[in-house]
Image (tube, grey):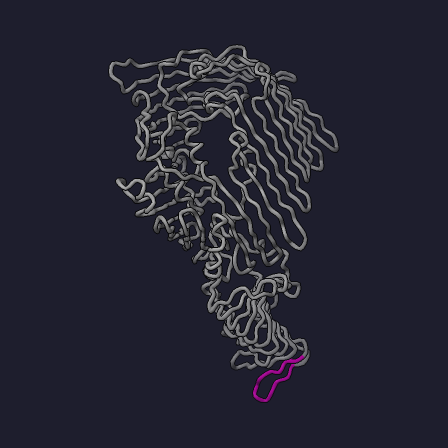
Amino acid sequence: MKFKILQSKNIKYSLAFLVLIATKSISGFAQDYLGAESNQNNVQGCIHPSFPLLIDNHATDSLNAGIMNVLSNGDISLDDNVFIAIEKGNINASSATYIQNQGEFKDIKNGSIYHSQNYFKFLNGSLNKQSSAIKLSDGESFLRERNLHIKYQSLEGKLDDSLEFRDASLSSCNDTSSGWRIEAEAINISEVTSRGHIEDLRLKILDKTVLRLPYLPFPATTKRLSGFLEPELNFTSDGLDLFLPYFWVLSKQSDITLAPRILKKRGSGLEVNYRYLSNNNTASKNYLDLLFFPEDKEFRKDYGANNNDRWAFRFKEKRTISNFTTSIDWAKSSDSMVLLDLPSSITNIANQRDHYLTQSISIGMVLDRLSFNIMREGHQSLNPFINSTYVKKPEVQIQYIQHASNLSYFIKTDFSNFEIDETKYSFIDNNLSGKGGERFVAEVGGEILHSLKHVDVSIFGTVLHKKYNLDVANTNSLSSSIPSIKIKISSLFRKLSESDISLISPEFVYQKTNFKDQSMNPIFDLHQRNIGNFNTSNTQYFFGKDRIPDSEFLIGKLKWQKRLKNNERFNIELIKKNELKTSRVINEMLISPIGKDNQIGTNLSFEKKNLKTYISANYSQKRNTLNYGNAGLEISLPETNLMLSRSFQKNIPLLNSTNEIDYAEISIEHLMSQGYKLIGGITKDLNAKKNLESYFGISFENCCLAFKVYASDKRLSKYNFLNFQSLQLSNMSWENMISVENKSRINFEFELKGLTGGNKRINSFFSNAFLNL
């Protein structure tokens, strides 16, 4: 159960809604995930020793007692250690009367029924063996699946059908004074529908009455059920934000969540999350997410001439049928700002800082060594400063690979037709240079492996040929061929002992890619950011296949690894890279050219039971500075978990105007006395001196009750493009713009274990978000 209150100044307005949300949150809880797990993990530690799990091997006609008398009317009187076997269980009692012609046991004294792993203890009662009807008084029951303990004055119903407890109390706690308890006039549970409801109840937490309700439904099973999920109530800069999700189980492999939403200043809308599994394989998870907000009042104020309907969707699916594989990842939005203005915890269309939505569909086939793939790939820009991108319609890839022990070779061909895809709601005109066109790329390569006594030698060579036909009049086709070679000499030395194993692996690499003037070639592919200076297959990190950097360098590596029997691990790697020539292709793309460089790098890591740490760095001898560094530390103590990480890079071509990034993150969980825990964390952009995300709070948890109160903030946005002016509009403008405004919120969560369930989405904080930057 959760509540979110955004902006701390609005806290006082939230109290009036607290009881309302508590009512709705508990009353409609439903399991909301595919492949429901056992609920025992939620109640681990709440073991009731009076109700052990038994294995019953008795025949259903077994009947035994210390004293058995046949009465004059044919009934049988049972006394002293009475044992009666029934379907799916048994009865133990001090005495009972068996009415043979009705198949009923009456006047059961001090009885205990064990049925389907559930217990029913009572002072007086009766049971019909044929109909499974029971009538018990002054007793207690234990329902194992949800770990619920019920005390009652009377109980009537049928086993495996429905039960009604009168003047009852319900809890999953051994000690309700330190947990929760519900006292009610009636508790009804249906085994047929796997649902229950409680009438005229009082909810007590830590022996304090916190809520009174006339009616409360709840799930009587841990299996997936349709029903209302936990609602969310937020106070934001757009006013009250409320939505109530309904979870609908469609089949064993599919479900849908429908969430009507009301946002005071913007209007009402709907969010939908449809999930399903394909190929009977849980690894293939597919979904359709939809967000729809008709007549956005705030959007109409700013852009009255445009359509006021705001919407976005994403459809993601992957299927495998025999040798064929299909993949769809298609997202689209009404405008570039809808996902910033209407963030959601139900849908997963895009992150608020994403630059684009993917629009791709492909079908592939694999036949032994031959593979074929055809796809359509495009993107919708979420950056309003980019109003057009290229779309591949289509891209056709054919690949043949032959592997042998000492010789491998491949042939790859790639044909792509590029068209310009204009983006709606853009505020500047930054048309792509040139027009669309066709690109054909063929690559032939091979690798020879040769093993000597202690040395492995690998020679890998490729020739890549490119050809362009552009949609520009009076332009001849452009073509170029670029050879590349890589020679690697490596070895591996092992040392084994009873307590540890050590590995030492030296490696030497020479690589050269010839220069070919590509300045007249268009740039169709969107480039990715460089991720490291030691990447030896770096062509994909610049401009895809449209710019193949020339390079020549030597790399030497020495790696030592050691693993002990107690699972302690050590890893040390030293790297030296000497660039033998300056890359002319890269310098042609830079305003300030860079020369060849010599670099030294290291990777260090250590891991043991309660400690993990790592450090990696790259030093430029020419610039006398660190190019990049990554460091992290994880400490796991009995009462404290601490995680720290730091990542920075500088002097990275094509990154941004400053060529620097610098992030740090810290999170801590400290267990205090009596089940309380202190939680906190922060992620910060040290270069921009801005907090990206942070949280701080306190939580409490025992075997039957959990709650959490914490404050958090996240950088969002607030802007009006009609009044926005900038001389330089770029990706950096976008990055700066979306971190303008800071929104804070206070979050409340609690869980009555056994009755409600924890929300896994909200319980997961960020953790080492920049660990692999």
Q: Nearer the viewer, residue 340 or 114?
A: 340
Instruction: Please say whether residue 436 is visible from this viewpoint.
Output: yes
Q: Farthest residue toward the bottom?
A: 72
Q: Is residue 468 left or right of residue 631?
A: left
Q: Is residue 114 above or below residue 322?
A: below
Counting from the top left corner in percent of width and height, residue 731 is at 41, 28
Which residue occupies 67% across, 55% down?
674
- Magenta stretch: give its range: 68-79
Snapshot quadrant of residue 753:
bottom right
Snapshot quadrant of residue 174:
bottom right
Q: Is residue 76 left or right of residue 280?
A: right
Q: Farthest residue toward the left?
A: 473
Q: Is residue 128 above or below residue 730?
A: below
133 part of magenta stretch: no
Q: Farthest residue toward the right?
A: 498
Q: Is residue 357 above or below residue 221?
A: above
Q: Nearer the viewer, residue 221 or 496?
A: 221
Counting from the top left corner in percent of width and height, residue 727 is at 37, 25
Counting from the top left corner in percent of width and height, residue 606 is at 67, 32
Counting from the top left corner in percent of width and height, residue 475 is at 27, 14
Count of numbered circles in the view: 0
Q: Nearer the viewer, residue 170 or 686?
A: 686
